[in-house]
Amino acid sequence: MDIGSISTKGVVLDETNHVLADHYLLTQGDPIGATRRLLRELQAQLPAHTHIHAIGTTGSARRLVGAMLGATAIKNEITAHAVGTLSRHPDVRTILEIGGQDSKIILIRGGIVADYAMNTLCAAGTGAFLSAQAGRLGLTVEEMGPVALTSTTPARIAARCTVFAESDLIHKAQGGHRLEDLVAGLVSAVAENYLANVGKGKAITPPIVFQGGVSRNQGVVAAFEHELGCEILTDPAGHLMGAIGAAHLATDSGRLDTPFQFDLAEDAYQTHTNPCTLCPNHCEIVYFYRENICLDHWGNRCNRGGAEGRN
Amino acid sequence: MTTIGIPRALGYHRYGTLWETFFDELDIPFLVSPETNQAIQSQGVRHTVDESCLPLKLYMGHAAHLLDKCDALFVPRLERLGPRDEFCVRFWGLPDTVSATFQKAQLLTYELNSGLPGTHERAFLKLGRTLGKHPITTARAYARAQARQREVDFHRFSYARAELQATAPRILLAANPYITYDPYLGGTVARLIAHLGGVPIFTDAWNRTQCRAQAREISTDLYWTLNREMMGAVHQARSQVDGILLLTAFPCGSDCLANELILRRVNDVPVIQILLDEHQSHEGLTTRIESFMDMLEGRRRIG
């Protein structure tokens, strides 16, 4: 499972690492609900009596969903994406990844992560930025790619900062630039911004695989090919790489004691936030319950305060 | 008897022992603000303009915390150690910033500004005079305070030497001391590294004079003392650690320049830069540190 800020992805792999089932849906700010909907979909795709022996989670809600499903591996996105991509493109040297709120570059040498960079904590130039601008132009995110490809004279737009880009975009729109030129300007700004920030100083050598939600935007793919002057591979399963990587990591980390039951997701899950009062930090400790039993808690800066207010 | 309040921020993380011992030796009661916490940060954010850097915001939070608990705030003006050795302008203007922010606050200060040898001692003799102490008493107190600070520094240096022998991944946490030793900033990162099985080693644990000289190996032009010391430590440690984590607080002008130089010129060891701000969630931080450690582990496996 790859539970990202914007979308939630899941795959089921068999012993030979073939994808038996996969699904993609929007998280909509509810990772638990998204996981539940996703598991229903995966179960429907699988033959009856399929045994799930290990579960891996990645993405920004990896800990929450990891606790929910009793995952055997809970890993960060860099590692999961590298492992997932290597399983399908063993010769890859550069992975470009732009997701909902993160963007990263991973350099692979000799089958391992040799170097990587990630955006700072600011989400400029990521999927969240594109979907906000799509909304402003009255388009859906999916429509942006095809529209961008029709432009011959892209507008120049600065994507360094969402706020600056928005004012640039408004000024250009009010100045009479055509819709396709604005969209093409936006997508090439995303690519340029990525290469100037995340990709700065990195040796970007082919084969290059571009993935993450934004890789489904053909406009951004074309902008990268233009900037880098070489072919950019996009995998039809590019959006699933994190999930595939998590599955591989789960396989390596051992088996669940008892096979996973899909209806586990149908239980009542609740989170409860309790500001700790033991010191002036007032850490917001999140307690996570299944059927009123606390599975896990997090958010505390120290070890004190964790057990308080559990049940 | 008046009590002096010492904010546990900025210069304290470099000269704390010196200051505390000095006041102790002169029998002057003092109070150091507690370690940074959420309440102090919120107070600091309230008392500073938006564009201030996070460490200055925290300083104001510490000052605000001390206001009604002491008679005077101890706010030194640290300008320069040598002709080409300057502190950042936040340190230069600190007494002014504090008195403009808290207009009723009584300030006790000393100035480190000539850049000539013996400046520090002369500044403290003057401080002693302000406090109504005899110059000989003050000179003795300063000598003891300085010796104690040296001892503490030396202890930190030898501790770091021992940590360099560790077999677990050794991460050089490269940052200004007021970030490194603030449990709310560097402390959070160091704890995460240790929690993930790594050994955090601080750049503030190398001989400072040597560091300032060694910084030339990376940049000959930089003149900010703290950044030069950090850079010199990076140069001396680069062959002895598995990875370097550049930690900076938003928005820091001198770090921006110094870290960029390190990122461009230190290519023999993996370097990651992490930017801290008023964020309350640790998820982004955890992801970045965990993936960095995973990469180092992968590189070690391959050899």
Image (cartoon, coloured by chain):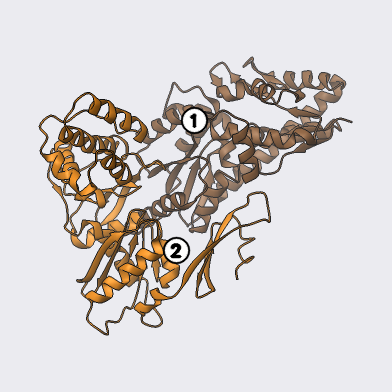
Chain colours: A orange, B brown
Q: Position of residue A197 (x, y in %)?
A: 32, 36
Q: Position of residue B43 (x, y in %)?
A: 64, 37
Q: Residue at x 63, y 66 (%)?
A: A309
- Between A63 and A249, the residue placed more toward the observer is A63
Instruction: For residue B165, say whether it is visible.
Output: no
> Alpha carbon of mark 2 to alpha carbon of mark 1: how far?
34 Å
Instruction: For residue B204, say whether it is visible.
Output: yes
Q: Height in image: A13 above or below B112?
A: below
Q: Residues within 10 Å of mark 1 (few under 14, many from 20)?
A: some
Residue extending farthest bottom: A49
Q: Height in image: B140 above or below A201?
A: above
Q: Chain of mark 2?
A: A
- Between B188 and B223, the residue placed more toward the observer is B188
Residue extending farthest right: B1
Q: Amino acid at mark 1?
A: Cys
Reading the image, the residue beneath label 2 is: A64
Q: Position of residue B95 (x, y in %)?
A: 67, 22
- Check disc 1 and report its element: helix, strand or loop: loop
Number of numbered tags placed on the structure image: 2
- Between A220 and B153, the residue placed more toward the observer is A220
Q: Residue at x 60, y 71 (%)?
A: A311
Badge number at residue B252:
1
Instruction: Please check whether the numbered discs 2 and 1 fall on a single chain.
Output: no
- Check disc 2 and report its element: helix, strand or loop: helix
Q: Amino acid at mark 2?
A: Leu
Q: Quadrant of the C terminus of chain B?
A: bottom left
- Between A54 and B136, the residue placed more toward the observer is A54
Left/right of residue A159 with respect to residue B137 in the rendered view: left
Q: Quadrant of residue B149?
A: top right
Q: Residues within 10 Å of mark 2 (few under 14, many from 20)?
A: many
Mark 2 or 1: in front is 2
Left/right of residue A281 with respect to residue B144 in the rendered view: left
